[in-house]
Amino acid sequence: MFIMEQKCSQDRVFSVFVDEPLKIHYIKEIAKKISLAPTSVKNHLKNLENQELIQKKKGERFVGFIANRDNKNFLFYKKIANIIKIKESGLLDFLIDSLYPQAIILYGSYLKGEDIESSDVDVMIITDNKKQIDIKRFEKILKRNIHLIMEKNLKKLHEGVKTEVTNGFVLYGRLKNE
């Protein structure tokens, strides 16, 4: 479904629902946002609706479309889209170049594809480096706040966070058993 660099127009339509899953979206609004003809948007919406990834919902004046967050396929594709967005945003390369980490782990709702507009991106960085870094530009690109935890190892983490991290997705390096 997703193509690196050159996204097909259906992926661009789907990305609107990935970024704002709780919002009701309308054909003209989507067309303007992604610079695609309304007729093409309408066709892609019909296809996404047939796959039950989105559903129609009555808005204030018109019928719009909203993400179907109860659909396991929507969550799966959103999870993949989120991981791709992390890579394409440049955040991963920036963290590697700035902090020389042993590992970078994505965890939490963003990894699960369950994030909403007010969610943050949870990232654990295993590093000796305590350098302060500015990640605001990546927050703007990802349209989410980024919550970074930097530790030498997992030992100092609260058990709940440690469990989340060990069940997370390793974006870089590897997680050692500690």
Image (tube, rainbow, N blue to C red):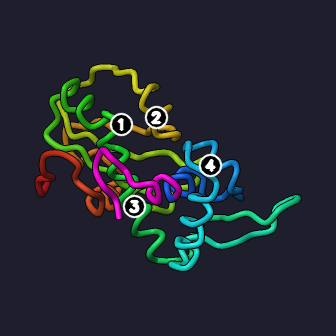
Rendered location of residue 51, percent (x, y)? 50, 78
For disc 1, the marked residue is 89
Tell me residue 129's x, y (percent): 21, 26
Q: Quadrant of the N terminus?
A: bottom left
Amino acid at the residue labelled 2: Ile
Q: Give the CA distance from mark 4 to mark 3.
A: 24 Å
Q: Secondary structure at mark 2?
A: helix
Q: Earlier in the sequence, mark 4 or mark 2?
A: 4
Amino acid type at image mark 4: Ala
Q: Amino acid at mark 3?
A: Lys
**In this view, the mark in front (4 or 2):** 4
Q: Mark 3 sits on what residue? A: 79
Q: Specify start and end residues of the magenta stretch as a single range.
A: 1-13
- Residue at the image point whose x is 56% and y is 42% from the top: 35
Which residue: 71% across, 58% down? 24
User: Residue at label 2?
Assistant: 141
Q: Nearer the viewer, residue 17 or 91?
A: 17
Q: Secondary structure at mark 4?
A: helix
Cα separation between marks 4 and 2 = 20 Å
Q: What residue type is disc 1 on?
A: Ser
